[in-house]
Amino acid sequence: MQVWSTLVDPLQYAFFQKGLLVAALSGTLLGLIGVYITLRGMSYIGHGLAHAIFGGFAASQLITSGLYAFGAGIWGIASALAINAVSRKHSISADAAIGVVTTASFALGIALLTKFGARGPSFDNALFGSILGISTGQIIGLSLVMIVTLIFVIVRYRALLFATFDPEVADVSGVNVARNDAVLMVILSLAILATLTVIGVTLVAAMLVIPAVVARMWTDSFGRMLWLSAAIGAACGLSGMYLSYYVGVPSGTMIVLTGAAVFCVTLVVSGARGRRRAISWDHHTEDVVALTPVR
Amino acid sequence: MLTRAECLISVRNVSSAYGDNLALHDVSMQIDSDQLTGIVGPSGSGKTTLLRTLLGSVRPVAGTVTRSPGLAVSYVPQLETVNWNFPITVFECVLMARRQHRAWPRPTRAERADVMAVLERLGIAELSDRHIRALSGGQQQRMFVARALLRNPTLLLMDEPTSGVDVNTRHDMLHMLNELNAEGLAVVLTTHDLNGIAAHLPHLVCLNRSVIATGSPAEVITPEVLERTFGARMEVLEHLGMRVVVDEAPALPRAVG
């Protein structure tokens, strides 16, 4: 009975209903995209991109508060395509380029907001996420990104899988790997933008990585990993939202902490087998040669 | 009754470069439909570039590459370059090569049957639900060949198919390639392994930026050709009718006793 009221009581508030819906959608969306991001070794790009988008968010809020999503979106997509282009060239290492471009963008955002803008609730919300003040427009935006992502992941399923597993062979087998990567980056930046206010730019990378890594420890099949990761993301979003309500801390922090707890439990329960899978995501395996002593 | 072999790819005076580095210089060769050919050469000799030129993923800076119309080429990567921790089963790995599919990604009954048939053909059907890491080196190689065969190729290109595999796997792979070739598939592979691979193949191309020699092992595995290909003197012996290459002199001073 008490459990029931714990779950139902907060639902009398409209802001919590919206928050719950947005958290579940955000978790699903980031869980889904996170599979591709982590398997491609692009977690750092996700992290950097979230920070770059904050720069756009801040800059466009100065011009007009109504169009901040539009401005941040353009900024985010531009950063995503720039990172993608840079990471395809070998003269500058991708992680260094990401480190420079995205943190500079983040710093610019903070500087602009502190100097000219209102360093109020919207600032903190963008950093750490909040369930207060979610507009219907945001819910529609998030739903649209979700639909686009689902269509992309379903219709391009095999091409995406091929390009993720084996980009070089996929390229010579008629898959346009460069275009797939570009679309993935655009979708990633749209997803970060759409989840920005609930999870927060500083925490969004965790929700890209945690559900995917946990799902990877649970299965060896790509298809299963995809829906498991989405489901884990949604579950973390929902439970994190309730915790946020009762504990009274920003929603993003509780969603991420829930994910981290699930990760730790999975790590312990799944034992050595799961640990090996999750941690050694290197692209080269070495055979262990046992040396026999010569007598 | 032998059917006449047709020319699949003709390479004429091709040069390729990465920036200022010339990877291939004035290379001419021909791939016929009945061929089982090894491209032999040291590291950096342009083997992989030549393979990619045949594949069409590297455009030459000079010369021409002519493919027979509608030629289907499949490519098998080096096992070392594969991410073995990727969450994928043997079935999923082979299926990804089938590009045309309905909007819903779940395989149709016909696709399932096609994948199982090609796995059956390569003798690994019972492993279809296994994770790719749970296979032996030879089975992993067969899986990638299965993925390549699902595209019904006329020509199979393999990059260093035996680097890092043990002797049984190497024999297993050579037998498999020979069978596929007998069934009508042209095969071109790259190797730097003279004794383990090259000496067993019916036809070789010795490459060191340019084509040094072309022919059967008996024709091209000679001290002169090897010196020009590998830049080192080697001694060629004969064992059970096969060429065996050994270093001319011990590389290090021998310990006495």
Image (cartoon, rainbow, N blue to C red):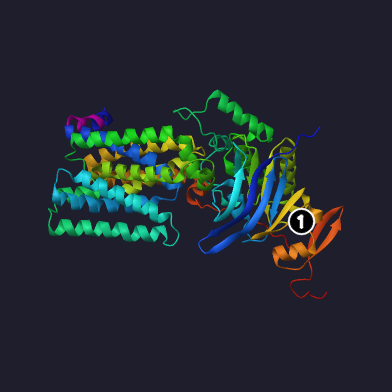
Disc 1: which chain? B
User: Residue sitting at 38 percent across and 42 percent down?
Assistant: A183
Is the residue B24 above or below the residue B86 in the image? Answer: below
- Pick the quarter of the image with the N terminus of chain A: top left
Q: Position of residue B100 (x, y in %)?
A: 50, 31
Furthest residue toward right: B240
In depth, the one of A4 and B104 nearer the eye is: B104
Left or right: where B56 falls relative to A243: right
Instruction: Determine if the magenta segment contains residue A11.
Output: yes
Q: Main secondary structure of the magenta part?
A: helix
Q: Which residue is mark 1?
A: B195
**Residue A215, position in %: x, y?**
44, 40
Residue A257 pos. (x, y %)? 32, 46
Quadrant of residue B90 in the image? top right
Q: Specify whether B30 is left or right of A185.
A: right
Q: Amino acid at mark 1?
A: Asn
Q: How many marks?
A: 1
Can residue A200 be seen by looking at this rendering? no
Magenta stretch?
Answer: A7-13
Quadrant where the C terminus of chain A is found in the figure: bottom right
Task: Based on the picture, tell me whether residue B94 belongs to the magenta stretch.
Answer: no
Q: Please report the residue visible at 16 percent of the width from the left and 39 percent of the height from the top.
A: A133
Vertical relation: A169 (above or below) A147: below
Taking depth in this image into account, of B117 and B169 the one nearest to the observer is B117
| Element class at badge 1 | loop
Q: Nearer the viewer, residue A205 or A193?
A: A193
Q: As drawn, is A291 to the left or to the right of A258?
A: right
> Can see residue B177?
yes
Residue A212, given in percent of the width and then of the height, sits at: 42, 43
Give the left or right position of residue B43, taking residue A35 as reference: right
